[in-house]
Each structure stands twice: as structure tokens, then as C-alpha cells.
Image: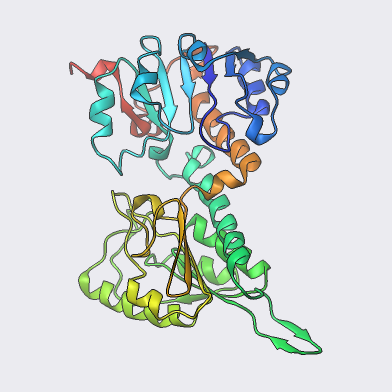
Amino acid sequence: MVIGIIKEEDQRAALSPDVVKQFVNAGNEVLVEQGTGETVWFGDSDYQNVGAKVASTADEVFKSVDVLVSLWPLSEEQWTKLKSEAVLVSNFSPYVDSTIPDMLQQLDFTVFSMDMIPRTTLAQSMDVLSSMASIAGYQAVLEAAQVLPRYFPMLSTAAGTVAPAKVLVLGAGVAGLQAIATAKRLGARVEAFDTRAAAKQEVESLGAKFVEVEGATDDTSAGGYGVDQTDEYKSKQRATIAEKAASSDVIITTAQVRGPKAPLLITRKMVEGMKPGSVIVDLAASTGGNCELTENARTVRHNNVTIIGDSNLAAKVSLNATQLFSKNVYNFLNIMITEGRFEPDWDNVIIKESCIARPELVDA
């Protein structure tokens, strides 16, 4: 079986040399487009030294591979260059655009979306959302620290004492918890809010204060995601967040739900009530943002508050992000490839839920 990767418009690579070596040792061939790893400091020779072959163009990869792994979905033009019955593994985000599975189903490919792998204990080693979210939470705090016109830690100097910065984290999932831990390590005073009751213990274990709003909808069956809340709860939530935002120097927003749009947590009025020089880093920017004024992939300033909209912050830590993504992919494909043959067990819940298109289902 030939597994391939191409050079993409991203600072990461889809597979690292150490994971390529594992695929090769398991009896597979790996084809890598020339220059694929240059943004991660991997040269073509690094891939060749572990047994991969280097192709001069992406088209050469497309016509040869049985399995193509990519960080981002291919364009329609690129799909036409793949050989029939190829397997595509990428992040298609069908929960953002529900038309994607129907479109892909018309193609002669088996398609897996890594971001649809169920967030269960058995699938933890394949969970790219958690891997990338952890890095994004860390990087979000560093981005804020670069912009904030004050120290994060408390400092006592001969000229006086500098109070620590106040950081508010909205959403205490994987990204939020990493943001809390990073902000605490930098010496900030940290508060965190989440609708999920189970998050309180995790937040407090990191030394942050948990902001509670009573009356949240039960979320035990949501698979680790937030759920939609009642209007009454949302009203209480807005009032509490507005109060906390007014005294915060930095707000990190990470709240996502399985759907096309992220929940709105920070309104224009809340931003206008924040202190001059404050910073908001919105990790939900690609799905509309948790802040009303967020613009995806842009940094904007409103009323002397800087708002950084970036859902791809993990890519800025390109080496570790590549390593973790690669290992997630290896663990995922490893349950479907046996002695160089693609043999998925369609009764396996991980495989079944992550597959968003199969040729066998077109006429079913």
C-alpha cells in the first residue's frame, strides 16, 4: 500500500519522518512531495533516510497513492487527479458544512475526517482535535502576552509593586485547560468559565478560580462538547461574563459546539467595557468566533482592545503540531491497515463514525 502526503499551505506537515518510518517498517510505501517538510525543518533527505520516496510534484503523488493524508481537504481539481478508489484522510469539518459528505459521496473515494473521530477513551490516541487544541491553548496565551502592554506576573521592585495580570478563560476543554496552565506558569491570576459541571474540578486543580453560573443544561452525553443552553441560562451567563470581562486584562475564548457556529460569549458592549490595552484571543474564529467583533485570521482593534481571531494557532508550533498530528494519523490508520492491505472493520465505531463517504454506499 502506498501512503502519500503533499506540500500544503500550512506551517505543519501531514506526516513526520519518525512516523513515516513506522509506516515503512510495517510494510507500506510512503511517497512525499518534494519540500513538504521544509516549514517544519524536515528536509527531503530526512524522509528518504527512513525509507520514503520523494516525488517532484503533487500530481506524481496523486496518481500513485492508495491513501492520501492531508492537513486540509484537497480542492476539487486535485480530487480529479487521484486514482480510483483512493482513501482520503484529512479534516473535513462536516459539522460546520453539512453538505460536504453528500458532495464527497459522489466521488469514487473512501473519505475519513479525523475531526469526526469520537472523543472516547479508546480513540484518545487518534484525537487530533485534542492534540491541536492543547497546542492552541498554550500559543493563545503567548500571543496575548506579546500584545498586552503589561507583565503577566506580580513583580516587586524598588520603584513599587506591579500587580499580576488578570486572565479570563472561556471554555475549559483541552485548549482552555492548557491556556489556564500556561497563564498560571507566567504568573497571572486566572479565572475560567465553562457550562460543563465536570470542568470545575479540572480548573481548580490547575490553581484557577472557576466562575459558576447556575442552571446549565446537562452535558453528560455530549461527548466532551458543550451543548446549547436555555435563554434564561444564557442571560445569566452574559451578565456574569460581562462583569468578569470588565476587570480582565486578557480573555482567551475556546468555546465550540458540534455545529456550524460557535456560541457568542463576548458582545460588542462587553468589549467596550474592557480596560484600554486589554487583549482577546478567540480560538473559535473560524466558526464565527466567541466574540462579536472577531474577524477570522485577522487581528483587529476596537475601543483600544486588541482582538486576535485565529483558529489555527497550533500551526505556529509547527514541529510539535506535526509530530502529534502524525502520531494521531498513524494510530488511526493502524487499525485499518493489515500487512500493507486496507481492511477496515466497518463495525468499529471509530472507523464508522469518522468515515464520511464510501463508494459502496452510493447505490445503497
In this rendered view, identify the residue nearer to me: 257 or 61: 61
- The picture places residue 30, in percent across and down from the top left corner, at 59, 15
- The picture places residue 324, in percent across and down from the top left corner, at 59, 39
Q: Left or right: where does residue 61 sit relative to residue 138?
A: left
Q: Residue at image x 38%, y 38%?
A: 116
In this rendered view, identify the residue nearer to me: 209 or 30: 30
Number of numbered markers: 0
Q: Quadrant of residue 235?
A: bottom left
Q: Quadrant of the C terminus?
A: top left
Q: Residue at image x 27%, y 73%?
A: 233
In this rendered view, identify the residue nearer to me: 221 or 230: 230
Q: Left or right: where does residue 33 sit relative to residue 47?
A: left
- The picture places residue 71, in percent across and down from the top left corner, at 48, 33
User: Can residue 224 be seen in the rendering of this structure?
Assistant: no
Q: Residue furthest toward the right?
A: 158
- The picture places residue 355, in percent across and down from the top left corner, at 35, 29
User: Can residue 264 be seen in the rendering of this structure?
Assistant: yes
